Amino acid sequence: MDMDIRWLFVDMNSYFASVEQQVKPELRGRPVAVVPVIAETTCCIAASYEAKAQGVRTGTRVNEARFLCPEIVFIPARTERYVHYHERIVKAVESVLPVHEVHSIDEMSCRLTGPDRELERAMSLARQVKQAIWKQAGEALHCSVGLAPNRLLAKVASDMHKPNGLTILRKAELPQALFGLQLDDLPGIGSRMLRRCHRAGIRSIEHLCNAPLPKLRDLWGGVVGERWWYWLRGEDLSEKPTQRRSIGHQHVLPPQCRTREAAFQILVKLTHKAAARLRAINYWAGAITVRVGFLGQWDWTESRRLPDVQDTCTLVSSLAEMWRQSPLHATPFKVEITLDRLKSSRSCPLPLFPEQRRRTELARAMDAVNARLGQGAVYLASMQGAEREAPDRIAFRSIPDCSPKHPAWRDTEP
């Protein structure tokens, strides 16, 4: 009996746009794009399959999307709505089998054990998952499901046939079943890793699979390359936890906020959000970076090293010091804040100085109040006037108030 299917991977199709079509039936069958703000200068963050058929993709500028598809409907992103449907989808999948891990707002994986690993049973479960999502989450919500011997390949399989596909990669057919794909179809091979592959003479998945194990170790710079050699052949290696590298938020400024004062207030709000996330996962930051894009296609960036901190006050004070160095006579268009050089609390000593301890305790007290009364119930005065700007957005690999773990293959690009 064939028992080599160990993972089921669920990938929702055009998730943000599909949620909008679920909520508004009049949008079904019509081209829809989700945007961060209604402005010609911003980009689409999601597109329905009707829009994709006319060339609109994630990252397409609004004015270009309107040219490609004059009948397109633009919808501002609604974070709470997408999180609500995400929770319904997780619940629907778990009515069929346990969700092992949530990877993003629209992706999750399930480990198959015992008789569920038999091919026919695994295919039946995949169909049941699809039906559960339609019935319990919404008839406009479709997913592609991948079945494979390991999670990396299950993810690859879920991308092979969209929308609404069901793809099986069997161990006996590997790695040849992958040869029709492109190198960057594999999660973890981005633009930089693709260039490294090309410099090493690897220009196809067939080349990658035929490369000896030592060459893959050299290519990835260590044991990760060895793990890839086994993954591509269907081995289900345990995945080591990865260290989070940075936390950040960015925001495209609406026209009424494209002033120096408003941009700073929004940067303060982004710093609030990043600091709260930092404390939620119990990490400390050793550096802060601010970046501003100005009309005229040029950027300003400033970084500051910090003692390991968690508290919002210290981070906002550092932001204010950096902001004094920013250009005075330019129109800001986009702002971004990043906290990096992160350390987990296990490897970071408690603050030495009383003032830093008090600031950390104050920040945690603010978190407790906001958790009870709602985000934004309390905030620093410097954010006054921007509290309704820069609402929560869905990052492609995270969910507000969630900290999904990422398997090792998500962080393999150097």
Image: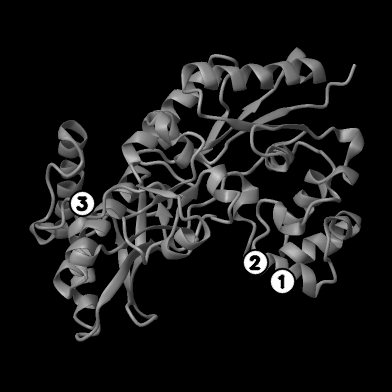
Crowding at label 3, few (<14), some or many (≥20) Cα neighbours within 10 Å? many
Say which element carries label 3.
helix
For the C terminus, the quadrant is bottom right
Residue 396 visible: no
Which label is found at residue 382? none
Colour mode? Answer: one colour
Which label's residue is closer to the chain start, 2 or 3? 2
Q: What residue is shown at x 48% (from left), y 53% (from top)?
A: 244
Classify residue 277 as left or right of residue 372.
Answer: right
Residue under pointer 1: 195
Residue 175 visible: yes
Residue under pointer 3: 360
Crowding at label 1, few (<14), some or many (≥20) Cα neighbours within 10 Å? some
* Badge 1 amino acid: Arg
Q: What residue is shown at x 54% (from left), y 55% (from top)?
A: 56
For the N terminus, the quadrant is top right
Pair 1/3: label in front: 1
Classify residue 205 as left or right of residue 355.
Answer: right
**Contact check, label 1 and label 3, Cβ < 8 Å:** no
Q: Horizontal and vertical percent for residue 98?
A: 57, 20
Image quarter of residue 173: top right
Q: From what the image shows, is residue 410 above or below residue 404?
A: below
Q: What residue is shown at x 31% (from left), y 56% (from top)?
A: 38
Classify residue 2 as left or right of residue 221.
Answer: right
Which label's residue is closer to the chain start, 1 or 3? 1
Classify residue 278 as left or right of residue 5.
Answer: left
Q: CA distance from mark 1 to mark 3?
A: 43 Å
